[in-house]
Amino acid sequence: MQQSFMKIFGIFGDPIEHSLSPAMQNAALRALGEAACYHAFRVRPERLEDAVLGAAAMGFGGLNLTIPLKEKALKLEILQPDELARAIGAVNTISFRQEDQNIAGHNTDGDGALLALQDAGVRVRESKVLLIGAGGAARAIAYTLEQEGARITIANRSIQKAQQLAACVGGLGFSLDELSRLVPGSDIVINATSVGMKEGDPRLFDRRLLHSDQTVFDVVYNRETELLQDARKAGARAIDGVMMLVYQGAKALEIWTGKKAPVVVMERAVRESLRERQAKVEKETKESREMRKAEETR
Ligand code: NAP
């Protein structure tokens, strides 16, 4: 029996089992009517080159990269990073050109953040942006918003990293101790650290520093963070990391297919996956509590 041809797309990372990209991209590919599927592959850094060459040889439609491979990809000789990926220092999207076997590296994280802000009606040009964090996500956001005409200040736990990144985007870098001074005067406050991913993470700054003229954007997408709750209470505009995830994926899909990405479908798929995940965690917590109780009364 002749099997119908399916184009394969994928995400490489390690760990990778919790990635939301397969749910999001498969929903998008279905909506676009593409005969294609998107899988997650666990790839260790030392096998990245082999894995990318294998995907190219097998005619993959495109790849995403996630932790811990984004920076490593930039160093691969087989890959041509574009100007933005080179400036950011990381590749999160790979495209293959079959005609000349070119393997290109892109970074769509910054565009993801910019589109998430624009989608919420936020004006970036001339705005005073306080970017908290100086890791991979922060670098992508800093370069993209700087190109868009934002005035950027960086605060980070490691002040040296804050100053280095700030110097690249024409701003100043500070330690987190300065947040009480920096937050009130900013138009847009962005959390690009991993703080907030876990329930009970301490707040980066006092919630009373926020006010209703501000936009607060948290790149964390796995839960509703305390920072976003504080922003809503202060009457500020609150944007979660889901839209950045969706738009970085949408940009990647557009690079691979040349078609406009179905953003609404992609957002729905991500939020549905997050709800299912949350329900599973709650069920498991309830079951283990009941088991403990039963053991205590035995
Ligand atoms: P990363 O390169 O490891 O950088 C981590 C950043 O968080 C650094 O600035 C680090 O400060 C800071 N940090 C970590 N723990 C901290 C703590 N306890 N207190 C204060 N600062 C702390 O990671 P990344 O790739 O940039 O990811 C950062 C976050 O962005 C993660 O939550 C990730 O899930 C999210 N993200 C979201 C999207 C999206 O599409 N929504 C895309 C990419 C990443 P130091 O430099 O001092 O260590």
Image (cartoon, grey):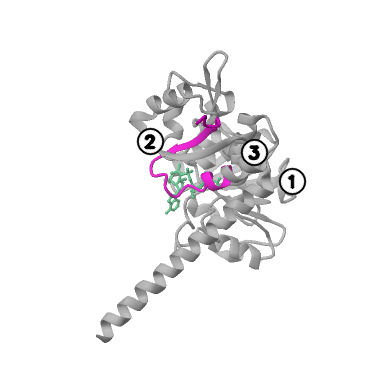
Magenta-drawn stretch contains 181: no
Q: Looking at the rendering, which quadrant does residue 78 occupy?
A: top left
State the SS at label 1: loop
Q: Earlier in the sequence, mark 3 or mark 1?
A: 1
208 lies left or right of 11? right
Q: Is residue 93 visible?
A: no
Q: Earlier in the sequence, mark 2 or mark 1?
A: 2
Q: Amino acid at mark 1?
A: Arg
Q: Which mark is residue 123?
A: 1
Coordinates of residue 88 in the picture (x, y in percent):
53, 32
What residue is disc 3 on?
A: 145
Q: Earlier in the sequence, mark 3 or mark 2?
A: 2
State the SS at label 2: loop
**Label 1, residues with CA under 10 Å away: few <14, some 14-19, many ≥20:** some
| Residues at marks 3 and 2, CA–CA distance in whole angstroms | 31 Å
Coordinates of residue 172 in the picture (x, y in percent):
57, 40
Q: Amino acid at mark 2?
A: Val
